[in-house]
Image: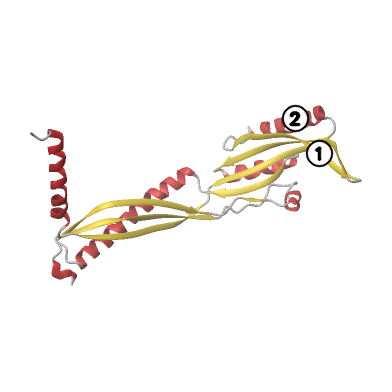
């Protein structure tokens, strides 16, 4: 009985695969290497979260007051076109009072949130001061590296890290007396280590109500890590003894 053509092809591939691998790797040494490049980067993106809050029994009045305050804030923000504004959250919460071992509802609390983001730190800081005068409170402020800056720095660091990796691979291949070498695989990973976005304490917010806050954007550290495998080829057995 003649063998099936597909089975014949499969057996032929299984027989040839180890022979090919041996021919390719018999005189090769696998070099597992890593390299990195890093840089301090100025934080050029400012993020601020503000809130307006009103409490009482009349929910219609509370909602109207919150809406009027937020409308004024958004109109003020239009005078600063380099600053992005959005209102991501609006909540209505019951307010309870615990007295004489009993809990009863005494009113309502309405809170609306305004988020601000900009790479124009001067304009953003000025706007924050105006918004605080308009009865909004800063509850969170932080600085980061913008996507545009991160991509530009990451590209430069990636090139540096790859060059360092290639230099290490070439040195290692020469050390084992390889005739030549080539990269087999390469992995790049970037990490950004910056200051966390911190909530502001109530007293600090109250102290800043009458003026724009003093800010220091600081820096973040961007690091690009390169790891991978290089094949040192043409290595003589005696070179590894």
x and y percentages locating residue 180 in the rendered image: 16, 59
Residue 153: image tag? none
Residue 92 vertical position relative to residue 183 in the rendered view, above or below: above
x and y percentages locating residue 96 in the rendered image: 83, 40
Residue 78 vertical position relative to residue 222 in the rendered view, above or below: above
* Numbered disc in front, either 2 or 1: 1
Q: Nearer the viewer, residue 115 or 2?
A: 2
Please name the residue that numbered disc 2 is placed on: 68
x and y percentages locating residue 16 in the rendered image: 13, 47
Q: Which residue lies furthest to the front in this view?
A: 1
Structural distance between the alpha carbons of marks 2 and 1? 22 Å
On the rendered image, what quadrant is the N terminus found in?
top left
Using a 10 Å C-alpha cutoff, classify the residue at mark 2 as few (fewer than 14 neighbours), some (14 to 19) or many (20 or more).
few
Instruction: Give SS at disc 1.
Output: strand
Which residue corresponds to the image point at 84% horizontal and 37% vertical from the top-left? 105
Which residue corresponds to the image point at 89% horizontal and 45% vertical from the top-left? 99
Q: In screen coordinates, is 111 left or right of 8?
A: right
Instruction: Give SS at disc 2.
Output: helix
Please name the residue that numbered disc 1 is placed on: 95
Q: In screen coordinates, is 138 left or right of 163?
A: right
Q: Nearer the viewer, residue 42 or 177?
A: 177
Q: Which of 65 and 35 is in front in this view?
A: 35
Residue 115 vertical position relative to residue 75 in the rendered view, above or below: below
On the rendered image, what quadrant is the C terminus found in?
bottom left
Q: In screen coordinates, is 78 left or right of 148?
A: right
The number of numbered badges drawn on the structure is 2
Which residue corresponds to the image point at 65% horizontal and 47% vertical from the top-left? 140
């Amino acid at each position: 009985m003649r063998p099936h053509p597909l089975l014949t092809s499969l057996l032929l591939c299984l027989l040839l695969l180890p022979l090919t691998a041996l021919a390719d790797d018999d005189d090769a040494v696998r070099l597992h290497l890593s390299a990195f490049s890093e840089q301090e980067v100025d934080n050029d993106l400012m993020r601020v979260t503000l809130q307006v809050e009103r409490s009482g029994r009349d929910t219609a009045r509370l909602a109207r007051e919150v809406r009027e305050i937020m409308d004024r804030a958004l109109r003020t923000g239009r005078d600063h076109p380099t600053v992005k504004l959005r209102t991501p959250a609006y909540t209505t919460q019951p307010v309870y009072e615990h007295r004489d071992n009993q809990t009863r509802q005494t009113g309502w609390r309405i809170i609306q949130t305004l988020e601000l983001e900009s790479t124009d730190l001067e304009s953003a800081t000025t706007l924050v001061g105006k918004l605080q005068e308009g009865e909004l409170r800063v509850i969170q402020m932080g600085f980061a590296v913008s996507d545009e800056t991160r991509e530009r720095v990451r590209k430069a660091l990636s090139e540096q890290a790859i060059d360092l990796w290639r230099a290490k691979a070439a040195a290692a291949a020469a050390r084992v007396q390889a005739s030549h070498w080539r990269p087999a695989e390469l992995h790049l990973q970037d990490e950004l280590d910056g200051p966390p976005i911190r909530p502001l304490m109530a007293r600090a917010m109250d102290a800043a109500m009458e003026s724009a806050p003093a800010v220091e954007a600081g820096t973040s550290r961007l690091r690009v890590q390169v790891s991978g495998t290089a094949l040192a080829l043409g290595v003589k057995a005696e070179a590894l003894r």
